[in-house]
Image (cartoon, grey):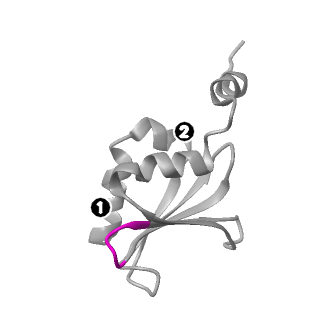
Amino acid sequence: MNNIANYIREILLSQLMVVFSWGAHNFQSLGESEEGEGGLLFNVNGFKHQGQVKIMLNWLDLFDVYLLNEDGCLKKKIEDVYIDSLIEVIDCAIEKVDNYEERVKREYSFH
């Protein structure tokens, strides 16, 4: 992985349990492009979004988050996210539903 992909991965790993709740897997490094200086792409299986998440460090040193469906088409773009809110922004976009606690209990109940 390149330096920017590793940087983003380290940010995500700072809240490992949240990232695990997304079903995050298949992490891939992204190089510099017209979208930004580089980034990270990975698959998720959240309550609200199933598909890919692309995080790019933009030219303003902020993050742009792209939610892509399973065939790679853009569903949503969230621009200019600060580092201290990156995980929360992604969590709200792919996982958090109104009745989140109840949904988790129902989905993962072993009774």
**SS assignment for the magenta stretch, majority:** loop
Q: Please give the name of the residue rendered at 68% of the width and 17% of the height, measured from the top-left corner.
A: 110
Q: Real-space Cα distance between discs 2 and 1?
A: 20 Å
Give the percent coordinates (x, y) of residue 49.
Answer: 67, 52
> Taking 15 as reference, is 70 above or below it?
below
Give the percent coordinates (x, y) of residue 93.
Answer: 60, 51
User: Dot 2 lies on which element?
Assistant: helix
86 and 106: which one is in front?
A: 86
Quarter holding residue 38: bottom left
Q: Is residue 57 left or right of residue 51?
A: left
Residue holding disc 2: 21
Query: Looking at the figure, which quarter contains the N terminus?
Result: bottom left
User: Dot 1 lies on which element?
Assistant: helix
> Taking 46 as reference, is 77 above or below it?
below
Looking at the rendered structure, the kind of residue marked 1 is Tyr
Labels 2 and 1: the sequence-earlier one? 1
The 10 Å Cα crowd at callout 2, few under 14, some 14 to 19, many 20 or more, is some
77 and 69: which one is in front?
A: 77
> Taking 36 as reference, is 15 above or below it?
above
Looking at the rendered structure, the kind of residue marked 2 is Ser
Give the percent coordinates (x, y) of residue 83.
Answer: 34, 56
Range shown magenta: 59-63
Circles 2 and 1 in contact, beta carbons < 8 Å:
no
How many numbered marks have been drawn onto this rendered protein structure? 2
Tag of residue 7: 1
Q: Please give the name of the residue rendered at 70% of the width and 65% of the height, measured from the top-left corner.
A: 70
Q: Please give the name of the residue rendered at 71% of the width and 71% of the height, measured from the top-left corner.
A: 71
Q: Is residue 31 left or right of residue 66?
A: left
